[in-house]
Amino acid sequence: MSVKIRLAQRGKKKTRTYRVVVADSRSPRDGRFIEDLGYYDPHQNPSTVEIDVEKAVSWLDKGAQPSERAQKLLEISGAWAQWRSSKGEVVSIPKPPAEKIKSSSKAEIKRQEASAQSSESVKEEE
């Protein structure tokens, strides 16, 4: 039996949240799982990642293989670095991700340009 650490979707369309779960690789994406490790909410600013590090490290020790996205979340939470350091490797502590900025609206773009011009004018006066 191959065990994977992966994401299971929860919530409605366009407001998805994800549970980080340990599941058999043959089970469906949102189906039966062995253990729930935490959750990931990409809609918050910055994204919310809550993972039980001790459980994650124990499953990694047992040989569970994380998916690509689950591995990124484990790196953000610090579980990946803790697991690698327990194996004797030298690992740097990851930095938290930068804050998301939704700049798709024209008003936001104009506001950024105005603030950039005002900061330039202040520098010129000095």
Image: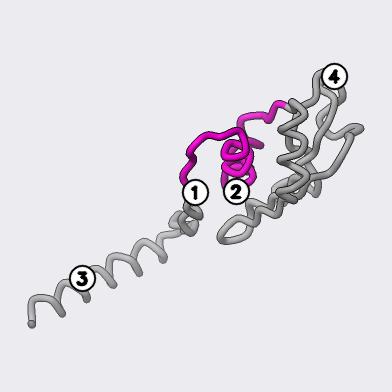
Q: Tell me which numbered mark, 3 or 4, is placed earlier along the sequence.
A: 4
Residue identified by numbered label 3: 117
Q: Is 27 or 77 nearer to us in this picture?
A: 77
Circle 1/circle 2 CB separation < 8 Å: yes
Asked if residue 68 lies in the magenta stretch, the reply is yes
Residue at (69, 49) in percent of width and height? 40
Question: Dot 3 lies on which element?
Answer: helix
Residue identified by numbered label 2: 78
Residue 35 location, x and y as percent?
Answer: 86, 40
Q: Tell me which numbered mark, 1 or 4, is placed earlier along the sequence.
A: 4
Residue identified by numbered label 4: 26
Asked if residue 18 lies in the magenta stretch, the reply is no
Question: Dot 4 lies on which element?
Answer: loop
Magenta stretch, overall SS: helix
At label 1, counting other C-alpha atoms closer than 10 Å, the crowd grade (few under 14, some 14-19, many 20 or more) is few
Q: Is 110 or 47 nearer to us in this picture?
A: 47
Foreground tag (1 vs 4): 1
- Residue 94 bears which disc, if any? 1
Q: Tell me which numbered mark, 1 or 2, is placed earlier along the sequence.
A: 2
Foreground tag (2 vs 3): 2
Question: Dot 1 lies on which element?
Answer: loop
Residue at (80, 39) in percent of width and height? 21
First to last magenta residue range = 65-92
